[in-house]
Amino acid sequence: MTRIAPLFTRLRAERRAAFIPFVEAFDPNRETSLALLHGMAERGADIIEIGVPFTDPMADGPTIQAAGRRALLAGASLAGVLALVQEFRSRNNSTPLVLMGYLNPILAYGVARFCVDAAEAGVDGLIVVDLPTEEAELLLPDAAANGLDVIRLVAPTTSDERLPLVLAGSSGFVYYVSITGITGTRTASAADLARDVPRLRRFTDLPIAVGFGVRTPEQAGIVAAHADAAIVASALIDTLCKADVTAVLELAAELSAGVRGVKKI
Amino acid sequence: MSIALPNSLRAGPDGRGRFGEFGGRFVAETLMPLILELQAAWENAKADSSFQTELDYYLEHYVGRPSAMWFAERLTRELGGAKIYFKRDELNHTGAHKINNCMGQILLARRMGKTRIIAETGAGQHGVATATVCALFGLPCTIYMGAVDVERQKPNVFRMKLLGAQVVPVSSGAATLKDAMNDAMRDWVANVRDTFYIIGTAAGPHPYPAMVRDFQCVIGNEARVQLHAAEGRLPDVAIAAIGGGSNAIGLFHPFLDDPSVRLIGVEAAGHGLDSGAHAASLSRGRPGVLHGNRTYLLQDEDGQIQEAHSISAGLDYPGIGPEHSWLHDIGRVEYVAVTDDEALAAFTLCTRTEGIIPALEPAHALAHVAKIAGGMGKDEVVLMNLCGRGDKDIFTVAKHLGVEL
């Protein structure tokens, strides 16, 4: 079992949702990413999602696209991201880490070797954006053999008929892409979430995390009221661009407080 | 439309959209239901003779099909070997083969009740063809085009705008076709309910590679009949240029089960295959996943996609349609590469011997014809797809010839 399931068990006892910030690895350099990972863990990140840079991030909006470009210019690679995780783990062996990226770098690395190395480095879960259920057998056996959670994306377009298929073989948590769109653009309303999250719960006992378009502590609080975790990415990257690591960590602390302020029934 | 027979090389793809190990549906979950809906709609349309009747009507009366078959007699004499025939898809309305596919897809979009069209374009030929059919049917249209291509294909940008399309310059990545396709996919994800994405080449997630191929097979099907009328036989060689590979698969597919027909696809070697500046995915790439399908890609050791280069914006793409990857691996089609300079020489040759200004894309195919025709017998026949006219390229060619317009 990875660090993810025990975390959600603990949070259920604490009657609160999880806060999941996102760090694009190597944006704009390795040292910054390492500082952000440790800093976020210290300021209330329950899980950290690490973006693996790719030249063609088709599901991402302008903010994460630009972050990926900066990261690649700084020499990011999948092997480099695993080494970053390993270094983080030398000081932090408790915060669950989830890698989010696209399939081609994993194929180039070799799926089997990647799953072995990712587990060894201390990765807990994988989100592969362009690997839908129909193609997932490419990754599932190696991930399972190495004890990695494969976290599935579910979208507003995923019908009730399709949900059981999409959720089969998923573990860790379910990532609900709360809008039809790319990252960092639109935001789902409280009414959307009140309708959509219960729909998903009919099909899974896994925790449901909501991402895409969650930017402020208020929005994170709304997500926390309906779902089991709030994922924030673009707002943190925008802050890093405009200011510095300190400002990002301040925002992370506020977002975490927004999530923790909501008591679950 | 293609006919699939058991034990035929024309039977693919399988139910998962695979040609051997290539193809598939590698898209985000948000798009997956749309891809499945499109597949169902396409299968339904294929089985409905009224759809084909409607498509045939527009192809004949609007596009101008069948396109002519031309015996290039002076070129044949000049090269001194095989008889060279041009399948003249540059005579189609809008000047390239692209409209064969656009007409098919927009009729499907209308059938599905979609009210907005998006497309990507490289050279602008697919963008112009899409904008044209959107004007014809009164549908709003957004075309994504790399900012670099917007600059080097200004006449086509102006054409698209005249036709009422919104042209969105894409400045991410290398600002060429690959990046335009990324942004078109992002648009589609954000507008899933009303929007139909007309992909311009035989690539992307299933069912696009098969659907685009089927719409382009009109090229090979006509050529087969026309060449039979002219020569009473099949060609010895059929040859076409390849970027994503839609004109080539449209020409090749009807000949796949005829082992006597040698099929040759011509990739863009840019400054040379070992220069690092080319678009030859099969000659120099490795299998990987991009834009929804598994296929040969130009990529580095870390699986990051590399930028392609070609003098021809239409060939400037780091991937290739998955069926070509499969045909390459099983050896049914030979894939070769031609440099910018060789293509320019062929462009001039065609213009001066035949009075036809070809697009730089088919000029690549012609450059390879020029390499092999002289070594073939005078009774042998080469069939080349002249898939586009060169009006759009005169500025690029003038620049390379050192002429100020």
Image (cartoon, coloured by chain):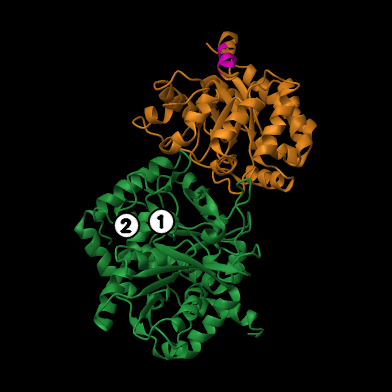
Q: Which chain is green?
A: B
Q: Quadrant of residue B268?
A: bottom right
Residue A86 placement, left or right of A118: right
Residue A64 placement, left or right of B375: right
**Residue, x 58% and y 66% (percent of image)?**
B149
- B316 or A82: which is nearer to us? A82
Q: Colour of chain A?
A: orange
Residue B181 placement, left or right of B260: right
Q: The magenta stretch spans which residues?
A: A5-9
Q: Residue B133: x percent and y percent? A: 38, 65
Q: Which mark is residue B330?
A: 1
Q: Quadrant of residue B141?
A: bottom left
- B123 or B292: which is nearer to us? B292
Q: Residue A86: x percent and y percent? A: 71, 28
Q: Is residue B87 visible?
A: no
Nearest to viewer (mark 2 / mark 1): 1
Q: Amino acid at mark 2?
A: Leu
